[in-house]
Image: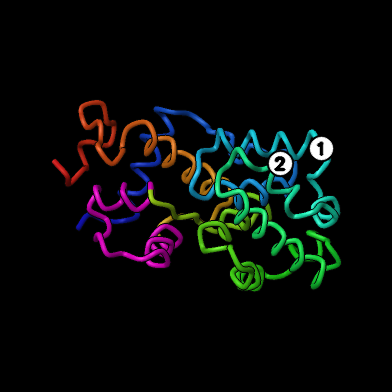
């Protein structure tokens, strides 16, 4: 098996040279990052942008505004992102949690240690590890690596993990092999998503892949 740290750094350098900075997460506020992270489950970012635009147009992009809106009305506003009734309920779950425990203040919540924030996020119905870590990295600005399906696919094909590797194992590989840098983790995750969408798909475009030399799929 190749050296993880060396391979991960090489993959990053190749993708960064190819794609350049990705400017993630595209949001105006930390709270908007959280909304986006929760809405993007099982849908494209383009649809999430439509839903967030509806929320912004109707002045529903603060904790208080989302607390005060009826759940059914909220569902209609976020309809473009799909599964809108479920996602409206999940957003309400988070808002209820934030007001019950932190008086609706993200600053108070984000003042906690990273592990405590993650634990509490995972206690909210509808927030899983990927969403929690997206919130930690992009909204709370903590050096936590976000793992998604693109990440696992890339690492399996590069021979760095086995197909049965779990979320925490993959996350430990990144966090144990790379400097714990918010900027690096942000850019690396964004580059993996870009490469996964454009090239390293389920049916990959190997003939144009810049990472093909290290790929074990050949």
**Which quadrant of the structure image shows residue 77?**
top right
The residue that appears at 41% across and 42% down in the rendered structure is 192
**Which quadrant of the structure image shows residue 162?**
bottom left
Q: How is the image coloured?
A: rainbow
Q: Which mark is residue 77?
A: 2
Report the residue marked by disc 1. 58
Residue that sits furthest to the left in the current view:
218
> Residue 152: percent from the left, percent from the top?
34, 53
Sequence-wise first label, 2 or 1: 1
> Residue 182: percent from the left, percent from the top?
58, 51
The residue that appears at 63% across and 46% down in the rendered structure is 36
Q: Quick check: marks 2 and 1 in contact, CB under 8 Å?
A: yes
75 versus 56 height, above or below: below
Residue that sits furthest to the front in the current view:
72
97 horizontally vs 172: left or right: right
Distance, label 2 to label 1, CA atoms, is 9 Å
The residue that appears at 31% across and 56% down in the rendered structure is 4
Q: Which mark is residue 86?
A: none
Boundaries of the magenta span: 150-176
């Amino acid at each position: 098996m190749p050296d993880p740290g060396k391979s991960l750094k090489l993959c990053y350098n190749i993708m960064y040279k190819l794609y350049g900075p990705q400017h993630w997460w595209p949001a105006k506020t930390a709270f908007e990052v959280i909304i986006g992270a929760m809405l993007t489950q099982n849908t494209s970012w383009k649809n999430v942008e439509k839903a967030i635009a509806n929320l912004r147009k109707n002045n529903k992009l603060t904790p208080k505004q989302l607390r005060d809106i009826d759940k059914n009305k909220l569902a209609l506003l976020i309809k473009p992102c799909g599964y809108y009734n479920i996602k409206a309920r999940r957003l309400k779950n988070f808002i209820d949690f934030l007001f019950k425990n932190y008086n609706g203040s993200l600053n108070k919540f984000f003042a906690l240690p990273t592990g405590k924030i993650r634990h509490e996020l995972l206690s909210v119905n509808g927030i899983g590890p990927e969403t929690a870590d997206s919130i930690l990295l992009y909204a709370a600005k903590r050096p936590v690596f976000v793992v998604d399906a693109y990440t696992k696919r890339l690492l399996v094909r590069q021979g760095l993990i086995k197909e049965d590797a779990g979320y925490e194992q993959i996350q430990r590989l990144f966090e144990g092999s790379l400097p714990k840098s918010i900027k690096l983790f942000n850019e690396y995750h964004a580059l993996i998503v870009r490469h996964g969408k454009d090239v390293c798909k389920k049916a990959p475009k190997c003939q144009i892949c810049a990472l093909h030399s290290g790929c074990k799929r050949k």
